[in-house]
Image (spheres, grey):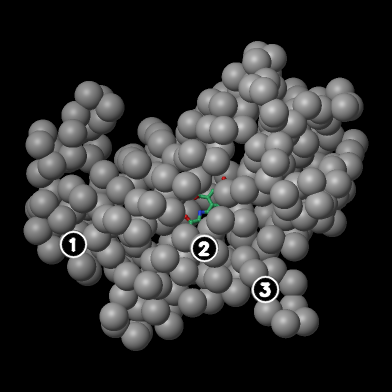
């Protein structure tokens, strides 16, 4: 079965029903997984980018996403810890700097805080992560655990959602600037910066899995790592939708003061 003919990927399992015999088939399947499962397809993103949310709902999204953003360098430190091979550690290291910054230079986490501050949230409250949804915490922690417990190949493969992030970021920058009067280019600088960082990272991870997954079984592990990660992202938006669009805010979670 080729990737192009996999219309019902959800009903099929990579490894059991689909056997990938080359690096090219692997890449085609990864791209198919992205095209059918990436969170760009989630209804919450359609609302966010289409200007259909109020300010409080956008605040809830940015507050919850802060937990993902601020955990990424911890996840990347875990990935690095899985490699005895110095060259891979060296290649992966800049990801931590991209998010944490360096002494005297700003990183992604600070840029994310510009977004939350620009949206009117108190930075100490955002950093405390007190108001995030339980599902956000569980999903993000599952990602860190995954990278610690699975094979180093799967740890790298789970970052492959980044292949699909730049299109989403383009759509987000354009959509949010167009539709929300409380959004300006300065507070969207996080996403602008990721447009150059993400392709470099994603291409390294893609080349890595193509070179190191050399059997159909290993290629299946890579695909399933990407499916796992699309689920990590998807459930975070399911939880936002349930809490802030459908109005079921769990006890203790952020309650918007503005609408
Ligand atoms: O805005 C998004 O939709 C989005 C998605 C993803 C992703 O696909 O995992 C990342 C990011 N943003 C992002 O900004 C980022 O730094 C990042 C790092 C990683 C990763 O798995 O290592 N994913 C993502």
Please state which of the two labelled residues, at mark 3 or mark 1, is closer to the viewer: 3
Picture quadrant where residue 147 is located: bottom left
Residue behind label 3 places its C-beta within 8 angstroms of ligand 1: no
Residue 86 x/y as whole percent: 34, 85
Residue at image position (81%, 28%) is 256
SS at circle 3: loop
Q: Is mark 1 within 8 Å of ligand 1?
A: no
Where in the figure is residue 127, as x and y percent of width and height? 73, 52
| Disc number lying in front (2 or 1) | 2
Q: Is residue 223 above or below residue 189?
A: above
Q: Which mark is residue 213?
A: 1
Mark 2 vs mark 1: which is more N-terminal? 2
Name the residue beneath numbered marker 2: 74
The answer to whether 201 is drawn above or below residue 172 in the figure is below
User: Distance between the Cα atoms at labels 3 and 1?
Assistant: 32 Å
The numbered mark at residue 101 is 3
Question: The N terminus is located in which quarter?
Answer: top left
Q: CA distance from mark 2 to mark 1?
A: 25 Å
Q: Earlier in the sequence, mark 2 or mark 3?
A: 2
Determine whether the residue tagged by mark 2 lies in a helix, strand or loop: helix
Residue 53 x, y percent position in the rendering: 75, 25
Look at the numbered discs 2 and 1 and tell me whether their residues touch, using CB distance below 8 Å.
Answer: no
Can residue 178 be seen at all in this image of the molecule?
yes
Residue at (84% x, 43% y) in the render: 121
Spatial separation of the CA atoms under disc 2 and disc 3: 13 Å
For the residue labelled by badge 1, is the local secondary structure a helix, a strand or a loop? loop
Q: Nearer the viewer, residue 252 or 213?
A: 252
254 or 186, nearer to the observer: 254
Name the residue: 53% across, 58% down: 72
């Amino acid at each position: 079965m080729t990737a192009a003919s996999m219309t019902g990927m959800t009903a099929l399992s990579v490894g059991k029903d689909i056997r990938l015999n080359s690096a090219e088939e692997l890449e085609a399947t990864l791209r198919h997984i992205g095209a059918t499962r990436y969170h760009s397809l989630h209804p919450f993103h359609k609302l966010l980018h289409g200007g259909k949310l109020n300010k409080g709902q956008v605040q809830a999204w940015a507050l919850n996403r802060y937990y993902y953003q601020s955990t990424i360098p911890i996840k990347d430190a875990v990935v690095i810890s899985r490699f005895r091979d110095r060259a891979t550690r060296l290649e992966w290291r800049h990801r931590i700097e991209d998010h944490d910054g360096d002494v005297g230079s700003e990183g992604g986490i600070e840029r994310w805080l510009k977004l939350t501050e620009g949206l009117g949230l108190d930075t100490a409250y955002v950093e405390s992560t007190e108001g995030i949804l339980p599902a956000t915490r569980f999903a993000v922690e599952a990602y860190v655990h995954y990278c610690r417990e699975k094979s180093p190949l799967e740890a790298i493969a789970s970052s492959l959602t980044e292949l699909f992030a730049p299109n989403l970021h383009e759509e987000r920058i354009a959509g949010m600037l167009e539709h929300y009067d409380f959004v300006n280019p300065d507070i969207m600088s996080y996403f602008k910066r990721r447009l150059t960082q993400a392709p470099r990272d994603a291409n390294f991870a893609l080349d890595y899995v193509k070179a190191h997954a050399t059997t159909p079984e290993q290629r299946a592990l890579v695909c399933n790592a990407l499916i796992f990660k699309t689920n990590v992202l998807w459930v975070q938006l399911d939880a936002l939708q349930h809490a802030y669009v459908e109005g079921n805010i769990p006890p203790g979670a952020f309650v918007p003061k503005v609408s």
